[in-house]
Amino acid sequence: MSGWRMLAVWAGEKIVLPSVRLLMVLTAIVVLGSAWNSTHAQMQQSGGGGSNASVGARAAAQPGSVTLVGGSFNSTLPTVTSGNTESLQMDSSGRLLVGSIAGALPAGTNAIGTVRANPLTSCGNTIYDSGITTVPTAEAAATSTATCVEAIYINNLTSSSQTFSIKDNQGTPVVYVNSFNLSANSNMLLTFGGIKFASGVRWVATNASAVNAQILGYQ
């Protein structure tokens, strides 16, 4: 091989081949970068459902996966059927509606809302309060309905002792307080713990406008 030819071959190896190798390296970097991005793409979500969940329409068949956030206020609650998807319901103040609190209380033994103790009496669960009244001098019924009496308040308005009696309202009455003497300008609270006064409560005082009383119980 002549000297000039050998010089040309040497120059090609030193100049041309490194350029080719650099181009191959850059091509490989681009290809590998594209492959990495395609298999490790970052999920970006803005507004609607992400790429890993299906967003179902309201009152429609439920998709395989659901993303539900927040709730809706409806002046008239929506009606949905079994298997449908619906958004959480809120009142006009943004409070979450739970179960039947949004509507009528369910029947049965459920007690939701105002909580109170209903006494188990043989008279009923309606509170009876006679209000303060003057005990008459002629025996009479304060109430003609069977009453489970919790308490009776008695007050002597005079400066002398007064006598009073309390009975139930049967044809042949049962006497619960017989001619009790209440000291001048004094009062007392008689507790009966729910004792049933059959057919109501009768009472009488010795003197007119001398004794005030009040009955509290259940009917």
Image (spheres, rainbow, N blue to C red):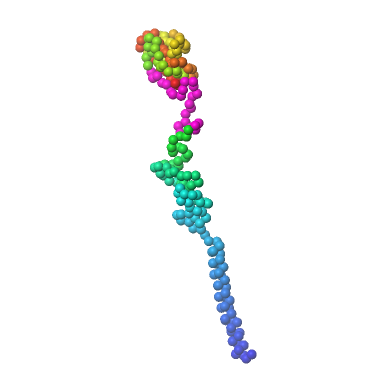
Write the residue at 48% across / 33% down: 107
Q: Which residues are magenta?
A: 108-132
Number of dots carrying numbers: 0
- Relative side of 34 to 80, left or right: right
Percent coordinates x, y for residue 108 in the rendering = 49, 32
Q: Quadrant of the N terminus?
A: bottom right
Residue ranking furthest to the bottom: 2
Percent coordinates x, y for residue 202 in the rendering = 42, 13
Q: Quadrant of the C terminus?
A: top left
Front residue of this view, candidates 111 and 57: 57
Write the residue at 55% across / 61% down: 40
Identify whether 66 is placed above or below 92: below
Write the residue at 48% across / 52% down: 55
- Decide if residue 151 is in sight here: no
- Relative side of 189 to 27, left or right: left
Identify whether 195 is placed above or below 14: above
Residue ranking furthest to the right: 1
Write the residue at 60% across / 89% down: 5
Magenta-colored stretch includes residue 146: no
Q: Quadrant of residue 185?
A: top left
Front residue of this view, candidates 67 and 18: 67
Residue ranking furthest to the left: 209
Magenta region, main secondary structure: loop
Percent coordinates x, y for residue 30 in the rendering = 54, 70
Percent coordinates x, y for residue 184 in the rendering = 40, 10
Front residue of this view, candidates 203 and 3: 203
- Relative side of 84 to 133, left or right: right
Magenta-colored stretch includes residue 112: yes
Q: Quadrant of residue 188?
A: top left
